[in-house]
Image: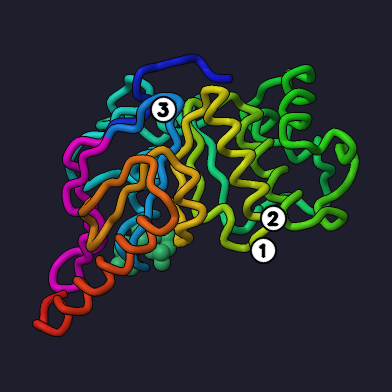
Amino acid sequence: MTTPVQSPVQLDAVRKTYGSGPSAVEALGGVSITFPAGSFTAVMGPSGSGKSTLLHCAAGLDTPTSGRVTLVGTDLAGKDETALTELRRQHVAFVFQSFNLMPALTVEQNVNLPTLLAGREPDQAWVNQVINRVGLTERVHHRPAELSGGQQQRVAIARALATRPSVVFADEPTGALDTNTALEVLTLMRELVSAGQTIVMVTHDPVAASFADSVLFLVDGQIVNQLNSPGVEQVAATLAHLGEQAKAKRARGQR
Ligand SMILES: Nc1ncnc2c1ncn2[C@@H]1O[C@H](COP(=O)(O)OP(=O)(O)OP(=O)(O)O)[C@@H](O)[C@H]1O
Ligand SMILES: [Mg+2]
């Protein structure tokens, strides 16, 4: 579905500190990770552990305090906002927990919006293919309010794919969905990866994470563990273990 590159996103010792002085918060404490083309990675960790910050830095939406982010072979350091916007438009797309669809627009118009905003003409054959891919061909002229939550998230995924991104970043894409609808969306994401798409997904749900090829665990801005093709129980057990560790650390008076 995308032009193959070996690793669309690479982070080297990425550190991100918000604020300065005594109120400074270190959201990422030197993260190094490569997301290979055609891979599905889940990112897990407690609230505030830096998951969203990792996605934002990886996508060039946020600038690291230090370290290097390489997006489809381009080092983001020193790029101005115009260059970053252009790179993002060409190579990355986001899916959020809230679907962020435009209520007044139809499914098809929502899917076409990022292309139009980029000043390009939608490729109708590709748009049809993408809408078909997410199973919404019968619904192209419907508006978001006429769709179920799962269908709305599938529109958001189709919109993400419309610009043929190298990588799709998803921040809790199933967070607002019931179990069955979430499974439907995860199955779709799994199929997209099988077709060559690269996906990085933040999730709190061990079931969602078990759909990924690899699961990263973040604690206090550091990758503390990585599991490959884990089962639900293994993910849940790892999370529980990290929770215990964090509790013990707090009891010792550390952060
Ligand atoms: N714009 C910002 N300004 C100041 N601090 C921020 C900002 N964005 C994030 N932080 C802080 O950085 C840390 C990491 O935040 P981040 O949003 O990455 O966490 P998260 O793992 O995505 O959490 P959640 O699971 O709650 O979404 C937190 O302590 C947060 O308060
Ligand atoms: Mg977050």
Mark 2 sits on what residue?
181
Q: Report the side of 19 relative to 251 (left or right).
A: right
Please tell me which of labels 3 and 2 falls first in the chain: 3
Comparing marks 1 and 3, which lies closer to the viewer? 1
Sequence order check: which comes first, mark 1 or mark 3?
A: 3
The amino acid sitting under disc 3 is Ala
Q: Secondary structure at mark 2?
A: helix
Q: Are marks 1 and 3 in contact (CB under 8 Å)?
A: no
Query: Where does label 3 land, which residue?
Result: 83
* Pointer 3 residue Cβ closer than 8 Å to ligand 1: no
Q: Residues within 10 Å of mark 3 (few under 14, many from 20)?
A: few
Q: Quadrant of the C terminus?
A: bottom left
Give the alpha-carbon distance from disc 1 to disc 3, as whole Å: 39 Å
- Mark 1, Cα crowd under 10 Å, few <14 / some 14-19 / many 20+, is few
Q: Is residue 255 above or below residue 253?
A: above
Identify the amino acid type marked 1. Asp
- Residue 115 pos. (x, y %): 66, 28
86 relative to 188, above or below: above
Camera-side residue of 40 and 232: 232
Query: Magenta segment range?
Result: 11-33
**How would you rate the neighbour count of disc 2 (Cα within 10 Å): few for under 14, some for 14-19, many for 20 or more?**
some
In the rendered image, residue 203, in percent from the top left (x then y), is placed at 46, 56
